[in-house]
Image (tube, rainbow, N blue to C red):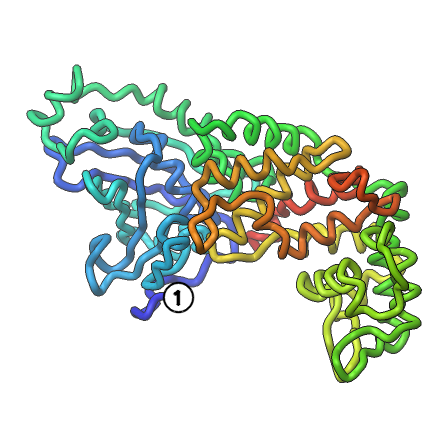
Amino acid sequence: MTAHRDRRHQPRSTPATLRVRAELDGSEPPIWRRLDIRCDLRLDLLHQALQAAFGWEDRHLHRFTLGGGPFDSGSQFFLCPFDVADGESDGMPAANVRVDETLAEPGHVLRYVYDYGDSWELTLTLEQLLPADHNSPAVVLVDGERAAPPEDSGGRVDAAGLAEVLDDPAHFDLDRAAAAVRRTVFTLGDSGIDPRLPPILRRLRGTSAGPEFAARLSRVLSDPPDYSESYADSLRAIRWFLDRAADGGIPLTSAGYMKPDDVEAASKVVPAMGDWIGKANREIHCAPLLFFREALRQVGLLRKYKGSLRLTRATAAVVGDPEALWDHLGGLLSPAGDGGFVEEATLTLLVYAGSADGELPTDSISAALRSRGWQHQDGRPAGFDALSGLPELTILQNISDRPHSYRDPDYLSPAASALARAALWVDRERSMG
């Protein structure tokens, strides 16, 4: 969170479309685009829209600001994922901010910079508030003039300078640019898919992992998750914990572990304990079981209270109803993050799990993370091993219709794959309310 004054407005409680003029600062004659933007669009997706509208390729860093320029000491900064991952603390992730929190009334101004070297700076001015509903498109390019400077062209914004790098600086093909905006990946937000996925796909473009990620995301889109009664048995490990916790709570020892009787009973239903060697009666010696029940607590299914594991209030409402539990789990597995590694890695995991065909493609997940440039603190590329602490992974591995086996370590059940897809879909009407 930035140390500067928070300049954001309250998000709108009813749908609206914001008509916004985006003009390239210093351009002469003016280079501008006019966009109709649904008020609940996040700034990271607005970034994608601007990239498409101005014909840029998202190769460089960017940020949005309120109250001043992109590097002014008094500005409030909304940061791209690279700045967040790099430890930039003077600002908040753009992915966490809605457009209507920055542009609330006609005349309000939001600033944007792309490429800290060439420093293409845009001033976005809210011109009108237009009626909308939950089915209104995320963003539409409606007008504009003149060609934008191409990538890495040295910061030129005047007609004479642009004539050195463009055949016709005055030419702007509105139809082509509008089609690019419609075609660009941020419009996945209109499909009901998690709006944080399009920027990941865009950043993977041009990498070796990009085509497979795009194909898998397309598969997730084409196969919306529906609950099946056949999934109930795959939820039995989770249901055991919830049923046991509903019966007065699961007592813990003074050291915080489950008691031997409960360890023995849980070990019989937790898939990860399927080929565990040794007597399963002490939780400290049953790492797969300990990790699983801790994952249930981390995502919010269970809570610790007065020396026992209890149900959270939301979980108590779905005990005994597998379909309601399924819906609840889908919401809990969608990561709430800061735009950094954990959030992106979890979303990446869900895409590959949601498109899996009986086996989690660990090598492909590693390739995607490495293509994004994620690293361990010691500089090693971050692969699938970096996901080992994610509770979402532990839970998916234990939503299974059979025990785990060392012979088939990457097995992923149909139920787990479907639940991963469920976690990637959002309820737009709920998010607007």
Q: Nearer the viewer, residue 400 or 388?
A: 388
Q: Nearer the viewer, residue 136 or 270?
A: 270
Mark 1: few/some/many CA within 10 Å (<14, 14-19, 20+): few
> Up-down: is 111 above or below 146?
below
Q: Which amino acid type is marked by label 1?
A: Met
**Where does the C terminus fall, quadrant-wise?**
bottom right
Q: Residue at x 70, y 33 (%)?
A: 356
In screen coordinates, is 151 left or right of 28?
A: right
> Up-down: is 232 above or below 391?
above
- The residue at the far top in this view is 167
Q: Residue at x 77, y 82 (%)?
A: 307
Q: Which corner quadrant of the image does residue 332 belong to?
A: bottom right
Q: Which corner quadrant of the image does residue 425 belong to?
A: top right
Residue annotated with mark 1: 1
In screen coordinates, is 88 left or right of 374?
A: left
Q: Residue at x 89, y 70 (%)?
A: 262
Q: Position of residue 407 (x, y in %)?
A: 81, 39
